[in-house]
Image (cartoon, rainbow, N blue to C red):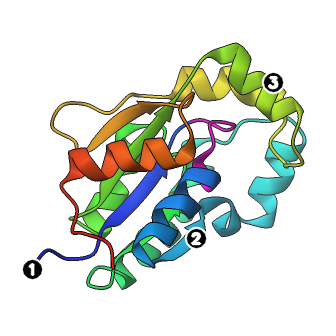
Amino acid sequence: MKSPPLVVVMGISGVGKSVVGHELADRFSLDYADGDDFHSEANIAKMSAGAPLTDEDRWPWLAEIGRWLAARGASGGVISCSALRRAYREVLVDAAPRTHFLHLVGDHDLIKSRMEHREHFMPSSLLESQERTLEPLEEDENGWAFDITPTPAEIVEAFVSLADLPPTH
């Protein structure tokens, strides 16, 4: 029998990680966490002020997310996390080797519009910084990229099909 999925819904700010993450977690009755909740107050203050995070800012945050994933290695779970660079994803996979990545991608103008019409500490002024930092999934990584224009349910269905996940309850 296949183990319940362990998934990081990744991508730049504004792509819908939380919405798709909730949809996927609900489908499998799994724990869900938002990676934003793992940021330190200093990280949130920095981003709120329009300053991008450095690798040094991100390492402790990624370690916390890795611990969350590792604690759900057997039971499964879904977490949203930007995971912009391969090195960041490697921290997560080192902590929880069977992690899948669901990478949400979309048009710059659509993402900027979404960011400008929501309540969040991440200002739309950091969109370009996130786009520059992003390293798309590579062929040897356990994941797939999905365009953000379909509904969250359609994205989840496509991911479940590609990831060959166990049937839902």
Q: Residue 135, percent across and down? A: 41, 28
Compared to 109, does 64 lie above or below?
below
Residue 33, label in figure: 2
Query: Which quadrant of the rendered structure holds the C terminus?
Result: bottom left
Query: Which quadrant of the rendered structure holds the N terminus?
Result: bottom left
Q: Earlier in the sequence, mark 1 or mark 3?
A: 1
Residue 14, label in figure: none
Q: Earlier in the sequence, mark 3 or mark 2?
A: 2
Q: Earlier in the sequence, mark 2 or mark 1?
A: 1
Kindly report the distance in space between the C-alpha atoms of the residues bearing marks 2 and 1: 25 Å
**Image quadrant where residue 136 sits:** top left
Three-letter code, disc 2: Ala
Three-letter code, disc 1: Met
Q: Which residue is mark 1?
A: 1
Three-letter code, disc 3: Ser
Choose between 122 and 80: the one closer to the eye: 80
Choose between 158 and 11: the one closer to the eye: 158
Magenta stretch mostly in which secondary structure? loop
Q: Secondary structure at mark 1?
A: loop
Viewer-side label of 1, 3: 1
Choose between 31 and 128: the one closer to the eye: 31
Q: Which residue is mark 3?
A: 113
Choose between 73 and 59: the one closer to the eye: 73
Q: Residues within 10 Å of mark 3 (few under 14, many from 20)?
A: few
- Relative placement, left or right, of 89 versus 59 is left
**Image quadrant where residue 50 sits:** top right
Compared to 73, does 22 lie above or below?
above
Kindly report the distance in space between the C-alpha atoms of the residues bearing marks 1 and 3: 43 Å
